[in-house]
Image (cartoon, rainbow, N blue to C red):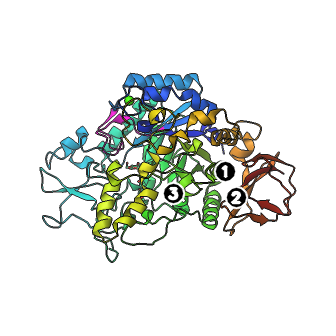
């Protein structure tokens, strides 16, 4: 496989609204982001992914784009963006923009036109269908944030399709004119200096054109028949055309977000090592290691146990590795703006917060793939507990309403929200122990976690035992003498089937290392037919490495040169 710059990328995801506010309006912005580039450089980051910064009514914090060619007023101006690109260049860093191609805001001029009449030239930019009756939508499909996937238009009698909120109508990928406008827009951003794109919700671009009803589970109002709009074979055609029209002949990297329904069997639909597909894809199997079908009254993701299923996790890592090593490229991430904080989710955010956060970092980011660190993860930020009225995310409110209507007790619903809500990841970045964690001098748009006095960047920067310093060490493996080994070396999973311990080796023609981690508090002893030379990284100060019988303490994680 030909080497590419993005094989060596160490990416940091920034949720601009929550990262750093420069003008005391309580909202993070581009100028604030620029002021933190040196911090990111220090951490070992060479690429940033910035969540949508386009003009938007901010109903879904920018994933509802109303103008692709303007910067959201909350975040700054196009000049600020050009300045950001220049400042990144100066530091030898790259920028990946979020690209939302599945839907726009209902305030986008295309939609304003499209909804105005049946024969508007932009009518087919979106998906309009007749209902089954005056109040019955065209299909019984359920959207990702609950409720039907259809909203009745105001001017005509037809319904428009939307997978997310009512204010985010889905674009019609069967319209060539619409796609051509998207391709032009993408090229405009490449010309401006963007180095790559994270392609949002790409699994859902294709819709089953027959628009048939799906099966409804007993007790549910709508059909969770996601196969009607997830990972359809037609994506092969769409993605090839998108890559050809927008990316061929450039050095741009692309990462497709292949959400619900995309299994390793579908990997090559999205990414196959050629320029005709995405450079890599975000998979989700590992995000829901601890959810089960549980309570059918609520969608699966809310049935979370906050306990890592290590056996399942290892199977998932191995199957994606087997499916892609040598033929495509992988991504490695624990968290993003849609997932709960990883140390609360899969680690221990109480007594073992520090040691478990370090263990999670070592275990994942030394695997094969491009790492994506989510802002705040590198200091071990945790989930937050809030009252319903303190949340911001529209998903929380539709979920709450529907779960209560379905008969789930209030206490259970609030417990699910506390564990799973996306706002857990969106609370402001904790920079120091001054008011509002140094994020803003105004009133933050979302509550700052009360634990900021204990958990913040400033207190960790110089501390040799901090989570931040540990992340630096882990990421440094991708820059120092182990670089080729970690970026390109083979993985051999040693503990498939193990419920608590995960161990693997990385190997190339020159070097071999082993990573071994205990995911829980309880001590574990394991034996390996391997001889260790020395410990090259650990989350304890005095880790031992006789591999014929190695005992791992609570959340202990060791990297050993073999
Ligand atoms: O998320 C996409 C997304 O939520 C689905 O693709 C996913 O399969 C589903 O949620 C599974 O439960 C992206 C963004 O990351 C998110 O923040 C946005 O709200 C969403 O798209 C709409 O743009
Ligand atoms: Ca601001």
Q: Nearer the viewer, mark 2 or mark 3?
A: 2
Q: Quadrant of the N terminus?
A: top right
220 or 376: nearer the viewer: 376
Q: CA distance from mark 2 to mark 3?
A: 27 Å
Residue at x-position 34% and y-position 32% = 72
Give SS at disc 3.
loop
Q: CA distance from mark 2 to mark 1?
A: 8 Å
Q: Give how far across and how far down residue 304 sits, in percent.
A: 48, 64
Query: Is residue 527 in view?
Result: yes
Residue 355 bears which disc, if any?
A: 1
Magenta highlight range = 50-69
Q: Which residue is mark 3?
A: 284
Q: Which residue is mark 2?
A: 554
In the picture, measured across the screen, residue 546 lies left or right of residue 256, that is right
Badge 2 vs badge 1, beta-carbon distance below 8 Å = yes
Dominant SS in magenta: loop
Label 2 crowding class (10 Å Cα cut-off): few <14, some 14-19, many 20+?
Answer: some
Label 3 crowding class (10 Å Cα cut-off): few <14, some 14-19, many 20+?
Answer: some
């Amino acid at each position: 496989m030909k080497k590419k710059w993005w094989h060596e990328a160490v990416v940091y995801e920034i949720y601009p609204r929550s990262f750093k506010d420069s003008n005391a309006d309580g909202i993070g912005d581009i100028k604030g982001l620029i002021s933190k580039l040196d911090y990111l450089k220090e951490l070992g980051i060479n690429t940033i992914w910035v969540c949508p910064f386009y003009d938007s009514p901010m109903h879904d914090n920018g994933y509802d784009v109303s103008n692709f060619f303007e910067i959201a007023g909350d975040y700054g101006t196009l000049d600020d963006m050009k300045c950001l690109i220049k400042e990144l260049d100066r530091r030898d860093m790259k920028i990946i923009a979020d690209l939302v191609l599945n839907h726009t805001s209902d305030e986008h001029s295309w939609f304003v036109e499209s909804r105005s009449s049946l024969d508007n030239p932009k009518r087919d930019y979106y998906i309009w269908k007749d209902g089954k009756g005056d109040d019955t939508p065209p299909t019984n499909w359920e959207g990702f944030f609950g409720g039907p996937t259809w909203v009745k238009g105001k001017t005509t009698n037809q319904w428009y399709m939307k997978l997310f909120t009512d204010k985010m109508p889905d674009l019609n990928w069967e319209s060539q004119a619409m796609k051509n406008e998207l391709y032009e827009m993408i090229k405009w951003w490449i010309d401006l200096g963007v180095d790559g794109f994270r392609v949002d919700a790409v699994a859902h671009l294709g819709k089953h054109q027959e628009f048939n009803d799906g099966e409804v589970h007993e007790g549910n109002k709508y059909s969770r028949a996601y196969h009607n709009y997830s990972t359809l074979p037609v994506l092969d055609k769409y993605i090839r055309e998108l890559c050809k029209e927008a990316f061929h002949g450039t050095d741009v990297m692309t990462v497709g977000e292949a959400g619900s329904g995309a299994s390793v069997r579908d990997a090559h639909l999205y990414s196959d090592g050629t320029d005709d597909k995405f450079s890599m894809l975000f998979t989700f199997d590992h995000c829901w290691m601890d959810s089960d079908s549980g309570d059918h009254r609520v969608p699966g993701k809310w049935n979370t146990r906050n306990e890592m299923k290590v056996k399942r996790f290892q199977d998932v890592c191995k199957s994606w590795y087997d499916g892609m090593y040598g033929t495509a490229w992988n991504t490695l991430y624990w968290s993003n703006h849609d997932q709960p904080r990883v140390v609360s989710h899969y680690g221990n955010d109480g007594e073992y917060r520090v040691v478990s956060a370090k263990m999670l970092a070592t275990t994942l980011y030394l695997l094969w793939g491009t790492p994506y660190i989510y802002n705040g993860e590198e200091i071990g930020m945790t989930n937050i507990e809030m009252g319903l009225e303190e949340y911001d995310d529209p998903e929380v409110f539709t979920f709450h309403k529907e779960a209560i209507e379905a008969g789930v007790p209030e206490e259970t619903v609030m417990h699910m929200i506390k564990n799973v809500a996306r706002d857990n990841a969106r609370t402001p970045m904790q920079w120091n122990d001054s008011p509002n964690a140094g994020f803003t001098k105004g009133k933050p748009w979302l509550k700052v976690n009360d634990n900021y006095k204990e958990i913040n960047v400033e207190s960790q920067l110089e501390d040799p035992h901090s989570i931040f310093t540990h992340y630096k060490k882990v990421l440094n493996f991708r820059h120092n003498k182990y670089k080729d080994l970690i970026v390109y070396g083979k993985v051999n999973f040693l503990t498939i089937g193990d419920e608590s311990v995960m161990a693997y080796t990385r190997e190339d023609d020159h070097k071999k290392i082993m990573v071994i981690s205990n995911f829980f508090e309880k001590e574990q002893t394991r034996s390996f037919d391997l001889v260790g030379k020395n410990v090259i990284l650990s989350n304890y100060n005095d880790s031992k490495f006789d591999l014929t019988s190695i005992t791992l303490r609570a959340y202990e994680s060791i990297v050993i040169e073999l």
